[in-house]
Amino acid sequence: MLKQRNYKMKYDSSTITSILSLITSISVAIFSFIQSRANNKQIVKNKKELEMFQLNIHEQKTIVEINEKHRKIKMDSIMLFITEIQKLKDNLKIIINSSNQKLDSETAKKMIEKISSNFFNLYEQNCGFLDKEENQYIHKMKNMTYEIKEIIESNLEEKEYVILSDDQKNILRDKSAILTDYQNMIRDLKDRQLRV
């Protein structure tokens, strides 16, 4: 009987050992499963963060490209405004210095009308690209262009050739000088932005 009892104890010990091994194996499996799920969640989270980072970089690159295009359009527009004002000033000089029936009135009016019209169209097409300060100066230049056009047309009405009094010439010279001031202010604003 004693032998049988030992055998039962052995059996009980091995059963217990087996059960403990089984519990340990199950615990390890559960822990591994949980760890695997946590790792998978972290991998998914990391992958999403990487995708968001890449998307953010792409968006920022696109924003930089758009800003650079906007800046180029703006700089080109400013140069066009400066060029048109210079044409106006050059034509004003021709009109002011015209004497002895060298320039007919219709040609003079058409010269100024064309530049005035070009300037107005440039302003309409490009004012949205300008900063507030640039827009103010260029708007003043546009208005000045219109004023000069009106002065030329009214002073040359019913005249075959350009004949201006000294007072009329001085008014036009003053307007030209004001345009030069605006031109220089716009040029300074453009140069400041190029340095940025």
Image (cartoon, rainbow, N blue to C red):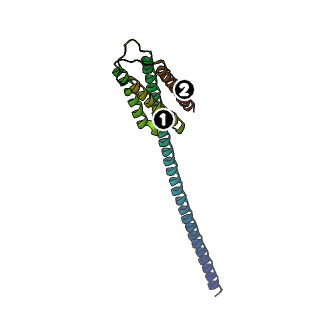
Q: Compared to 6, does 96 lie above or below?
A: above
Query: In the depicted view, which residue is nearer to us: 164 or 10?
Result: 164
Question: Which amino acid lies under the numbered mark 2 shown in the image of this protein?
Answer: Asp
Quadrant including the N terminus:
bottom right
Q: Where is residue 57 in the image (x, y as percent from the top left)?
A: 51, 45
Q: Mark 1 points at which residue?
A: 139
> Are there few (<14), some (14-19), or many (20+) residues within 10 Å of tag 2?
some
Work out whether mark 1 precedes mark 2 in sequence or the reverse, and give the earlier one: 1
Query: In the depicted view, which residue is nearer to us: 179 or 192?
Result: 179
Q: Mark 2 points at which residue?
A: 181
Q: Position of residue 157 (x, y in %)?
A: 36, 25
Q: Label 1 vs label 2: CA separation? A: 14 Å
Compared across the picture, whether 170 is left or right of 107 comes to right
Query: In the depicted view, which residue is nearer to us: 71 or 128?
Result: 128
Query: In the depicted view, which residue is nearer to us: 196 or 47?
Result: 196
Query: Helix or strand or loop: what does disc 1 sit on?
Result: helix
Q: Compared to 129, does 169 lie above or below?
A: above
Q: Position of residue 21 (x, y in %)?
A: 59, 71
Q: Which residue lies furthest to the top in this view?
A: 100
For residue 96, what is the image quadrant? top left
Question: Which amino acid lies under the numbered mark 1 shown in the image of this protein?
Answer: His
Q: Residue at x 39, y 26 (%)?
A: 153
Compared across the picture, whether 183 is left or right of 154 comes to right
Q: Which residue is drawn at 48% across and 45% down?
A: 59
> Are there few (<14), some (14-19), or many (20+) residues within 10 Å of tag 1?
some
Total marks in image = 2
